[in-house]
Amino acid sequence: MDQILLILFIIFCLSIPNFYAQQNYSGNSVTNCDNNDETGPSPAFLYTCNGRKQSCQAFLIFKSQPPYDTVTSISNLTSSDPSEVAHINNITNSAEVLPPDKEVIVPVICSCSGQYYQANTSFTIPTNDDTYFTIAQNTYQGLTSCDILLRENNYSATSLNPGLILQIPLRCACPTSNQAVNGTKFLLTYSVGSVDNVYDICERFNVSIRSVVHANGFTENVLDGPVLFPFTTILIPLSTEPLSSQTTIHYPPPPYSSPLIPLSRYNIRSSNRLYVWTGIGISLLVIFFVLSIVLLHYKKKRNEAAQKIRKGKGKEDLPEEFLLRIANIDQGLKFYKYEEINAATENFSTKNMIGSSVYCGILNGETVAIKKMIKNVCKEVNLLKKINHFNIISLYGACEHHEVFYLVYEFMENGSLKDLLHKKSAPEVESWNCRIQIAVDVAHGLLYLHNFTDTGYVHKDISSSNVLLDKHLRAKIANFSLARSAVRGESGNVSTKTALGTKGYMAPEYIEYGLVTPEMDTYSFGVVLIELVTGKEAVYKQDGEEVLLAEAVFSAMEGGNVEAKLGCLIDPNLQAKNKMEFALRIIKLSLACLSQEPESRPSMAEVVSSLLKIQLDVQRTEPFFWNGFV
């Protein structure tokens, strides 16, 4: 009994720091760009990757300021989904100019990268006056820090020039196990203003002061009120998604307010303090006692399950080798029984088939896509659980039955880009706005894949068949069966094997030498861009012979009368307004992506920047539709 009590006491003592300091508040350290994290993660950089999940849905609060005062501009600044931003903020017009300092909720995917959580975006420097400090504090309102910007970008603090593209990791975090036990499902990163205080913020978001104090590791007496500084962030633990009704418009502070003076405090009579802290102490003891019992029970059950597998029981659905090879996968991945998969697809009925070896099914009331594969899928599963991004297909779960593997993905209502482009009648993709948005989505997905995963990955098979479209015609990259690390020396850069990929999309250096680099994805993306403009397949028939689309466009751009030649190639279904202007701009970008020499191709960051400029011009000439709103 004494040993049990000792163990519980040790667990209690070890757990107290985590309970009180889920994350640590940065304070005014963010005003210094010379912080270091050599001895451990520092809140002056980002939030520590200490949650129970490597990736999760998170939210940011951004205050509208010109030129970032519309859904479109804020979404572009944060690389978030404009339809999601509009929906959660109850805004029906993406071009509507919001009042200054209006709080906007921004949904993001938050993922671990090394020792920190981050949501990734990019930013093109507009003026000579911009510095890492002003970008972090003014443009992004403290949602990033100059320390992390210095680390993530190859430019020195004195060499920032207009036109340079910076990688911007935004502050976010996933709930810890302790927070999850207490009902926290989401963390909202709140950008602190000059008149904010914890009491008012908690009241607006309907959360307890104690949960916010614990979430941010405040060391001051909660009854006196934590000290907050402008251009910093705090985390708000939420049990449900934030509501637009919880946001507000901030008005300028009184003239005597100072940005570096601690903000207002709230007061509670000191005579109540002893009772409050006594209650907290007792609650903590009870919580940790219960958690200890649950932990012991969980370990017992896990050991029993492991013994069951070793004895050969249950192998039909979850073989030991399969479990071991994906042991490091995010615990959110669900392992389905074969009976569930079979029932969902109605015994793999042909009426449920939506592609080669892909079936539509209903699991737990949700429509999903189920992919049947004979080869081992452990590599693909591990990869997909590392690269969570809006523009990359989401993997929900997996199953194995008699050496056949089944992967359960989110369902994409509009199928592949290839199928939609070549439908006899597809009015939903006849606008430039729609096609440019698809191009931007794919480019964002590749930018994330190449630069913001742990090691960087190359997809190796980008094609219109592997670009899927959801019900809002937003694009997501799929089919990662050929993907591999982009790091030199890891699995090698050169393959002597026969090139694997889709004809018409493979880069010349890959076909000839088996060279695998991110630039081969850029080449394939260039072909997809041409498909979006022409509506033709990457390899099509003309006069009974096969023609490579890329070569046809190169030929059309050579010599004179370019517009007449391109006029024969441009998709006649596209709207006529400014058709040639936009077509030429996109084709020029695509031809840069199709350069024979890999080093001559633009980076995906440069591609995204170019496409966003084209998109803004397109939106000036066409109404922008999403979710049924203009």
Image (spheres, rainbow, N blue to C red):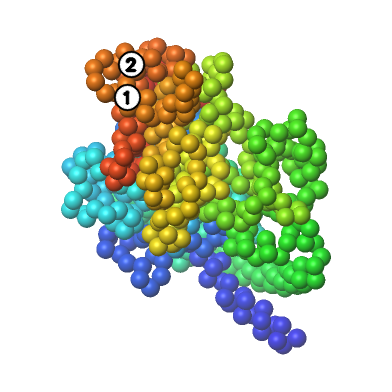
User: Left of 310 or right of it: where is 398?
Assistant: left
Cβ atoms at labels 2 and 1 below 8 Å apart: yes
Q: Amino acid at mark 2?
A: Lys
Q: Secondary structure at mark 2?
A: helix
260 vs 613: above or below = below
User: Left of 323 or right of it: where is 206?
Assistant: left
Cα distance between the residues tagged 2 and 1 = 9 Å
194 vs 273: above or below = above
Question: Which sits in the foreground, 318 or 385?
Answer: 318
Place of residue 298 in the rendered image (x, y in percent of width and height, measured from the top left)? 73, 68
User: Left of 175 or right of it: where is 323?
Assistant: right
Mark 2 Cα-neighbour bin, 10 Å: few <14, some 14–19, many ≥20: some
* Quadrant position of the N terminus in the picture: bottom right
Question: Which sits in the foreground, 464 or 336?
Answer: 464
Q: Residue at x 19, y 44 (%)?
A: 161
Place of residue 416 in the rendered image (x, y in percent of width and height, measured from the top left)? 56, 31
Using the rendered image of the protein, determine whether residue 619 is visible from the camera's viewpoint: yes
Q: Residue at x 32, y 32 (%)?
A: 591
Which-is-in-front pick, marks 2 and 1?
Answer: 1
Residue with the mark numbered 2? 565
The disc label shown at residue 124, or none: none
Residue with the mark numbered 1? 555
Question: Which sits in the foreground, 560 or 369?
Answer: 560
Q: Amino acid at mark 1?
A: Ser
